[in-house]
Amino acid sequence: MRLFRSFAYGLPVVLALLISTAPAFAQSSHLTLERFLSANEAYGNQDFGRAYLNWKLLAEVGHAKSQANLGLLYLCGKGVEKDVDRAVQWMERAATQGIVSAQFTLGFLYSTTKHGQLDPSRSIHWYLAAARQGHPQASLNLARAYEKGVRVKASSVEALRWLIAASKIDKSEKLQGKFVEFEQELRAKLSEESIAKAVELAECCSRGETVASGSAAKNPGRQSAGRRSELRWMSW
């Protein structure tokens, strides 16, 4: 406490400490990258045990993408005994740090009884977090939730909003077919004014803005800043 008794006294000391340890930080970052890439290579070679050890070391010191990948290993039982509870714990840590694939996967895990993690409110929470970062499947799942009123107030405007957002991101034929049919159903329920509102909200999504239409998802508690492919999780 004495060190920071006054701003003028404490700041130079802090700056000195940061400057003096800068080479150590740089070296640490380099080693982190090397270990992370080594784990990725091991996973690609199906050496899941080595991937597990390296990702675990990094995950324990807060490396978000390693936390997501470690959660994946626990979820799939690769290199370690399958443990869905631990998978969720590590993915929660990664998702809280903004890893979109972990956010989407949590949305899925909390939406089904298959893994014993059913929690619809948390499912919506994480789908919303992933959708706000541009995850198309999360946006599509949100659209379905709003259409049916699953743990959110039913809203065709919000459903159309997230559907349009998803269609702008994913141009694959597989999803576009779903988008077109669903969009026609939603538009048929709405007035021209409501459709215009949904389009406006979708544009806000594409610009990274978070404008609500009045039917926001219920907050299950903690707020945060699919697994579309395993390799995306492993990118630096």
Image: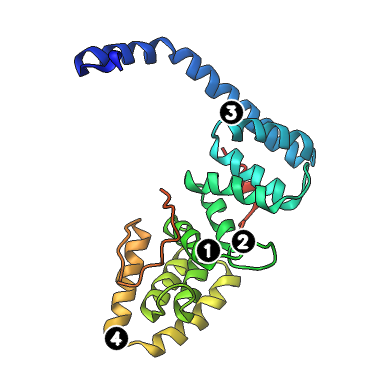
State the CA–CA distance, disc 1 to disc 2: 7 Å
> Looking at numbered disc 4 in the image, what kind of residue is underneath it?
Glu
> Looking at numbered disc 3 in the image, what kind of residue is underneath it?
Leu
The residue beneath circle 2 is 109
Earlier residue among tags 1 and 2: 2
**Which secondary structure, mark 2?**
helix
How packed mark 2 is, by other alpha carbons closer than 10 Å (few <14, some 14-19, many 20 or more), is many
The residue beneath circle 1 is 123
* Tag count: 4
Find residue 167 and name its label: none
Evaluate whether residue 78 shows in this view: yes
Earlier residue among tags 3 and 2: 3
Relative to 219, does residue 159 appear above or below in the rendering?
below
Relative to 112, does residue 33 appear above or below in the rendering?
above
> What residue is shown at x 60% (from left), y 41% (from top)?
67
The residue beneath circle 3 is 33
Relative to 127, does residue 22 appear above or below in the rendering?
above
State the CA–CA distance, disc 4 to disc 3: 52 Å
Earlier residue among tags 1 and 4: 1
Find residue 207 and report its image quarter. bottom left
The residue beneath circle 4 is 192
Horizontal side of 77 relative to 216 (left or right) equals: right
